[in-house]
Image: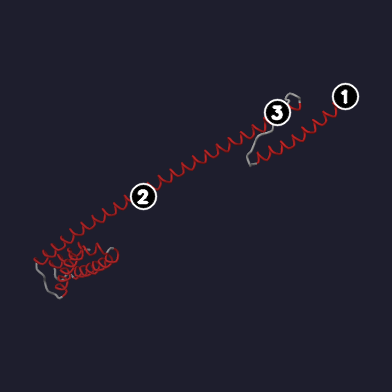
Amino acid sequence: ECLQTGQAIRNIYIDPKDQKALENLGAAINNLDSMDKNLLKIDVATHSGLKSDFELFVGDTKTLYNIASSGKRYGSEQIIENTNRWREYKKRLKASIKASDNKANAVKKELEAFIFESITQMIIGILTALFLISLLLFGINRQILRSVKSIHAGLLNFFEFLDNKNVEYKKIEINSGDEFGEMAKALNENIERTKVGLEKDANMVKNAVAVA
């Protein structure tokens, strides 16, 4: 819009009757006012920093527009003055844009650092959880294998006892409160009853042989 105002001002200077240039200048001024109001709504700090140079440039441009609208002709000195005001405003505008870009880049870097740190912490948390789960599964698996081995050894010991290979039967030692512990307890009770029954039968046979 600023470039359009400059072009329109020069065209009017060359041909004061150029109505198209005058219309373009008026439209450009209105658009600049609208953009200024939008900037005020979006970023008050940036608007405040540009306000002084903007008002000087737009005010001077409106003066030239009013002169041309009244049918009068402005001089080359006024065009040069308007151009200088535009250059000052342009310089301040570029500085503001650069500052905004730097601020945006800083925010972007902070956001990237935050995301990277969050992802890193999440990965560490997942790996830690997997490690703890692996330890838990290893411990459970080890406990299960120990219980199975104890039950297996106890049953073998009982069968050897039945075959008179062992004088003393050893109970299955599993003190856990899980299903294996309950299974071992039930086996020990049943085996004990079987053992007592076998001993009674053996005594009865001995007695019968002694009587005979």
Q: Earlier in the sequence, mark 2 or mark 1?
A: 2
Q: Tell me the quarter of the picture where residue 35 sits.
A: bottom left
Q: Dot 2: within a 10 Å radius of its alpha carbon, few (fewer than 14), some, or many (20 or more) residues?
A: few
Which of the two discs, 2 and 1, sits closer to the camera?
1
Which residue matches tag 2? 114
Badge 1 marks a residue whose secondary structure is helix
C-alpha distance separating marks 3 and 1: 30 Å
The picture places residue 183, in percent across and down from the top left corner, at 69, 39
Q: Is residue 177 left or right of residue 103?
A: right
Percent coordinates x, y for residue 20 in the rendering? 20, 69
- Measure the C-alpha gap from mark 2 to mark 3: 64 Å
In the picture as drawn, the residue positioned furthest to the right comes out as 212
Q: Quadrant of the N terminus?
A: bottom left
Disc sitting over residue 23 in the figure: none
- Residue denoted by label 1: 210
Percent coordinates x, y for residue 123 in the rendering: 43, 44
How many C-alpha atoms fall within 10 Å of the one at disc 1: few (<14), some, or many (≥20)?
A: few
Residue type, label 1: Ala
At a point 29% along the width and 52% down the height, the residue shown is 106
Return the residue nearer the eye: 201 or 116: 201
129 or 103: nearer the eye? 129
**Residue 130, relative to residue 16: is it above or below?**
above
Q: Can you say whether 131 is above or below 18 in the image?
A: above
In depth, the one of 104 and 155 nearer the eye is: 155
Q: Residues within 10 Å of mark 3 (few under 14, many from 20)?
A: some
Locate residue 146 relative to residue 201 in the image: left or right.
Answer: left
Q: In 3D space, how far apart are the residues under numbered discs 2 and 1 (Cα atoms)?
A: 93 Å
Q: Which residue is mark 3?
A: 157
Q: Secondary structure at mark 3?
A: helix
Q: Amino acid at mark 3?
A: Asn
